[in-house]
Amino acid sequence: MLDAPSLPRYIRPMTRTQFSHVDTWVFDLDNTLYPPEAHLLEQLSPRMTDWIAANLGLKRQEADELREDYWARYGTTAAGLMAKHDVAPAAFLAHAHDLPLDALKPAPELAAAIAALPGRHLVFTNSPVDWAHRVLKETGLDHVFDAVHGAEDAQYIPKPKPQAFSKVFEVADIAPQKAAFFEDDSRNLEVPARLGMRTVHVSPNPETAPYIHHGTQDLTAFLRDIA
Ligand SMILES: [Mg+2]
């Protein structure tokens, strides 16, 4: 039975055959596998600011501006801290991600939709692997993924930098021509598309660009239509 959503679910026409060559399904984690309404990333930011203020000896306002500036310029705040301050990222990220996950809910329908996709199911996040495992456990998605790749696997080089993709694709043995990538941050779709991946922008406001092949507001519904 077809739903009749008030908003279009897809910004580009989508057919099963556009994914029939795909045997590796790669998902971003934060705000992709759980909704942005959980507001988890917003909770990371003040904790990052606290760490920066304490460890770089800055006022809170200065630390907050630095955090935002590095996120915009380096892809993640951790990458900016590594590049400009020679900070070891593991301690910084562990402090930032030491959060309760009460805002997350189990997502059994999404779990079933991912499990039904033919082939390997992978997570590729800029967050630490330990955080990814906690999030997947809390949302009940832990059993549907074959592997989780995080900041450590990319040696803390973040998406959208090409080296982040090449490092993780090597570790995970991903052939881009036979893979699809699902991600909420549209900046992170350009390199995968160039490498030959089929790209899907998962967002309340899917964007249009030549490297965004599809967009959806409802990942579960989108995946059900592919499988
Ligand atoms: Mg994300």
Image (tube, rainbow, N blue to C red):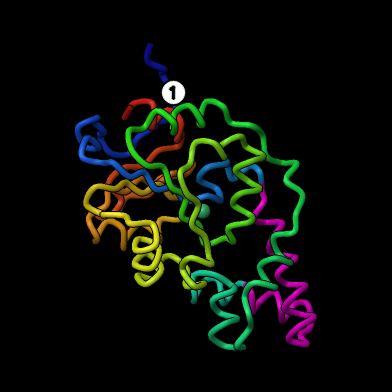
Q: Residue at x 60, y 81 (%)?
A: 81
Query: In which quadrant will I find the C terminus?
Result: top left
Please identify the quarter of the rendering in which residue 202 is found. top left
172 left or right, relative to 184 = left
* 109 is higher (above) or lower (below) than 122: above
Q: Secondary structure at mark 1?
A: loop
**Residue 107 belongs to magenta span:** no
Location of residue 155 in the rendering, given as x and y in whole percent from the top left corner = 49, 72
Q: Residue at x 40, y 46 (%)?
A: 182
Query: In which quadrant will I find the N terminus?
Result: top left
**Residue type at tag 1:** Pro
Q: Which residues are magenta?
A: 39-67
What residue did someone put label 1 on? Answer: 5
Location of residue 144 in the rendering, given as x and y in whole percent from the top left corner = 49, 36
- Taking depth in this image into account, of 212 and 179 the one nearest to the observer is 179
Label total for image: 1
50 left or right, relative to 104 = right
- Taking depth in this image into account, of 211 and 34 the one nearest to the observer is 34
Please identify the quarter of the rendering in which residue 34 is found. top right
* 227 is higher (above) or lower (below) than 40: above
* 195 is higher (above) or lower (below) than 223: below
Location of residue 84 in the rendering, given as x and y in whole percent from the top left corner = 57, 88
